[in-house]
Every structure is written in C-alpha cells, then in structure tokens.
Image: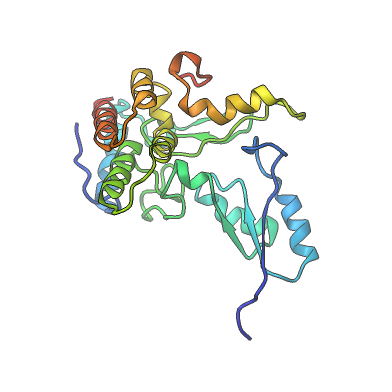
Amino acid sequence: MCVEVNTLWEPQLIGILLQRDMEEAGGVPTEQLITVDATLGIKILPHWLAQPYWRPVTSRTWDFSQLMLDLFDDILPASQSKVTA
Amino acid sequence: MGPPDTSVTLLCSLPFNPPQGLADWDKIKAVKEAVSVPVFANGNILYHSDIDRCLKATGADAVMSAEGSLYNPTLFAPSPPDLTAYDSGLHLPHADLALEYLRIVKGLKTKTSLSAIKGHLFKLMRPGLARELDLRDRLGKIKGDDPVDEYLEVVEEMKRRMDVR
C-alpha cells in the first residue's frame, strides 16, 4: 500500500500509517514492532520511521581514529561503514 | 519583574565530540541546585517522553535538543492522543520528512550547501539507509553545484521502498 503524504501533521494520516504498519506486520500490534537496544535499553522503532540515534560509548579515553570514524561515518561508502542492518 | 538576563545551558556528556553514550542528568541537577539563573538541560532527549522525565529529574527550567531533532524533526511534537503506540511524540516516516526537507531547500532563495543537505538526509533516513546500502552509496556520491534534484531521486526511491516494505 502506498500512502501519499501531503500534510504530515494530519492525525487521520498518522492513524492510516499506524494501521498500515500493523497490517504489514501480519497483524502484529504496532507496539510489538518495537525492539530494545541491548546496551542502553532504549527502544528502537521500525526502520521506516524517524527516530533517535545515539552513539555507543566506545572508550573512556581519547581515541583519535575512533573519533574520526564516528564523525564521518555518515559519509563513508557503505563498504567502509560501521552501520549494519 | 522582567525576564532574566542570564541563563545557562548544560550538556553533560562524556568528553567526546560528538558526544557518546547518554548525558548525565544528575550533573545538570547539581548545577541547577547551585545557581539562581534559569537552566536549560541538554542531552538524552531522544523521545518526546524524555522531555517530562528530564524536567523532573533535573529540576531544569526547560530542555533543548540539538542533535536529537536532526534525527527526528518532530521530536517536540506530541502524538495525537489515540496514536501513542510508539511514544508520546510523533514518529513519521523518515522518507516523507526528507522529502519535505528538500522541498523547503528548493524553496529557499539562498543556496544550501551540499554538505548540509547530505548531512541532514543521512541523519533523517539513517534507519532506512542502514538497510538500503545502495541508496546510502548513491547519496554519498552525489556532487555538483545543484544537486537537489539528485537528492530528490534518492529520497523518492527510499520512499518507494519503505512504502512497499
């Protein structure tokens, strides 16, 4: 199902999107599409939704190469990225 | 009494740039208790429901979000009362938010830098790009003086894929 979004703030539209999420998850209630980050216990929403991102703590000491990776991960080609599905 | 002429905004994260892990609200609380000027708490506002939690935990006068709102621009918008399945805040499809962002960019009289557009799109669509690696590569390789239409193509393709997931 393709939903044409013209007015992002319309409650009716958001209801349609949530209903679609549930239907496409095979009837699983929307709440059950939420997983939890194992390290920090923060919830992770389905991958098609805007949601927060946090950088895991990698070290208590300064690590320049790690910092550079964290800073530029967004623009690295996928083959060099740390991000996985 | 007029508005205060001084305030302080605190981000209590580990000493990394960009910050790692989660900010320490206890440090903000300690500062709030020690000063008489208004205090803005900054850090760990990941979800809309964190706003109230942060205000209660720190005693701060207000909260702010810097990076969090780049990943979810509707961070401060409450979800309609009956639609709080994910949180008390709005979580819209990121591809639609990205399309709206690009429409704003196209409508501006001043030019937006390539790196700014690219950075915003990578953050907005991060959950999708972590799976759609070919789109991630396409987005990363876009160059040129007027790349907005190329960005639009990638975002529209992301929307198609998210809509038929």
Q: Looking at this view, is B98 or B161 the one in front?
A: B98
Residue B138 x/y as whole percent: 33, 22
Residue found at x 30% / y 25%: A26
In the image, taking residue A14 as reference, residue A71 lies left or right, namely: right
Q: Quadrant of residue B151?
A: top left
Residue B44 x/y as whole percent: 60, 45
Q: Looking at this view, is A68 or A31 the one in front?
A: A68
Residue B137 x/y as whole percent: 38, 20
* Image: B153 above or below B83: above
Q: Looking at this view, is B156 or A53 the one in front?
A: B156
The residue positioned farthest toward the right in the image shown:
B34
* Image: B82 above or below A31: below
Coloration of the structure image: rainbow
Residue found at x 21% / y 48%: A6
Residue found at x 46% / y 44%: B70
Residue A16 x/y as whole percent: 25, 43
* Image: B122 above or below B65: above
Q: Quadrant of residue B146?
A: top left
For the question of whether residue A38 can be seen, the reply is no
The residue positioned farthest toward the top in the image shown:
A79
Residue found at x 38% / y 19%: B133
How many labels sit on residues? Answer: 0
In the rendered image, which quarter contains the C terminus of chain B? top left
In the rendered image, which quarter contains the N terminus of chain B? bottom right
